């Protein structure tokens, strides 16, 4: 299918999707959806891509400012529970913008937040605990009698006097070691990681440990993304944090493909196009939901 035809299908799919989302009883939109799907497999794939783009963030990936209490009460508990971005905004103690941010935690330890990252900073007389709600954080942990623990999704990472990165995107948690040692736990599973190791865990694939050069750990701190050892999906998740709206990959096989080399993050859209092209894919907009789609040839 020519590129222009693919773009047209995605935009037509987005138009039908948004109309039905705004009014499920719009009979004209229902008929248009049926007519659109009758165009064949390419149309079905385009609509599925738009639906997935909406599910992972749609027109606004970044959370809005913390909701005022009156707005929270008006919208109700259901809205709070069903809108992940609002819930994250409500819970976060610290949230970065579209660039990295360095801060000293209340425990005195150092945290460098990647773009679009938020966390909860908790400390008690007996332990230091951080919860990564979304994004990625590089930690430099001071020696202290109190345990230092990072919670990310279903994973708990405990460290003493070490430097490491924790990233949490969708259902995947990635822990990457620059120096020292950490213990990662989930339910009845446990992993011990040392310098130069990366653990990736997801519900679908479980835990996978890989080795890497420590110079490749959290290179986003210097606006460079070292791609070696990353899948296309993992790399795009990092770039996505720097781009308004959401970026969605059209199929899982493409997302799981491996990438290599490095890209400059100061121009995230160019970086996105570069790594997509390296896998024989393209980046095109899906109007009107404000998403960028990676796919096609």
Image (cartoon, rainbow, N blue to C red):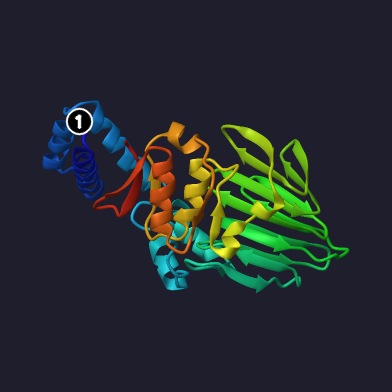
Q: In the rendered image, which residue does mark 1 sit on? A: 37
Q: What residue lies at 44% left-to-right and 35% top-to-bottom?
A: 254
94 above or below 272? below
Q: Quadrant of residue 34?
A: top left
The x and y percentages for residue 30 are 16, 37
The x and y percentages for residue 57 are 40, 51
Q: What residue lies at 43% left-to-right and 72% top-to-bottom?
A: 70
In this view, the residue in front, 91 or 194, is 194
Q: Quadrant of residue 79?
A: bottom left
Res 218 seen here:
yes
Q: Quick check: 45 left or right of 91? A: left
Q: Quick check: 55 left or right of 116? A: left
Callout 1 environment at 10 Å: few (<14), some (14 to 19), or many (20+)?
some
Q: What residue lies at 75% left-to-right and 35% top-to-bottom?
A: 188
Q: What residue lies at 45% left-to-right and 69% top-to-bottom?
A: 67
Q: Which quadrant holds the C terminus?
A: top left
Secondary structure under tag 1 reads: helix
In this view, the residue in front, 274 or 110, is 274
The x and y percentages for residue 249 are 40, 41
In this view, the residue in front, 232 or 77, is 232
In the displayed orientation, state which residue is furthest to the left. 28
């Amino acid at each position: 299918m020519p590129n222009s035809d693919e773009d047209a299908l995605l935009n037509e799919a987005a138009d039908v999707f948004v109309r039905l989302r705004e009014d499920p009883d719009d009979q004209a939109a229902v008929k248009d959806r049926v007519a659109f799907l009758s165009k064949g497999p390419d149309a079905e794939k385009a609509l599925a891509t738009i639906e997935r783009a909406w599910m992972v963030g749609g027109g606004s990936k970044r959370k809005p400012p913390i909701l005022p209490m009156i707005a929270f009460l008006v919208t109700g508990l259901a809205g709070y529970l069903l809108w992940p971005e609002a819930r994250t905004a409500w819970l976060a103690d610290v949230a970065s913008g579209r660039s990295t941010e360095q801060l000293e935690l209340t425990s005195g330890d150092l945290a460098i937040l990647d773009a679009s990252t938020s966390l909860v900073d908790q400390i008690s007389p007996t332990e230091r605990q951080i919860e990564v709600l979304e994004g990625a954080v590089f930690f430099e942990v001071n020696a202290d009698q109190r345990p230092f623990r990072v919670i990310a999704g279903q994973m708990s990472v405990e460290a003493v006097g070490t430097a490491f990165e924790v990233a949490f995107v969708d259902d995947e948690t990635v822990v990457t070691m620059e120096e020292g040692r950490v213990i990662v736990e989930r339910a009845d599973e446990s992993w011990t990681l040392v310098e130069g190791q990366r653990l990736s865990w997801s519900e679908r694939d479980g835990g996978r440990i890989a080795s890497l050069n420590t110079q490749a750990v959290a290179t986003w701190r210097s606006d460079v993304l070292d791609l070696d050892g990353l899948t296309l999906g993992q790399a795009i998740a990092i770039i996505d944090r720097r781009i308004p709206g959401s970026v969605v990959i059209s199929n899982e096989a493409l997302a799981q493909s491996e990438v290599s080399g490095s890209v400059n993050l100061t121009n995230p859209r160019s970086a996105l196009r570069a790594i997509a092209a390296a896998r024989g894919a393209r980046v095109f907009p899906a109007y009107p939901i404000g998403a960028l789609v990676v796919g096609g040839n």
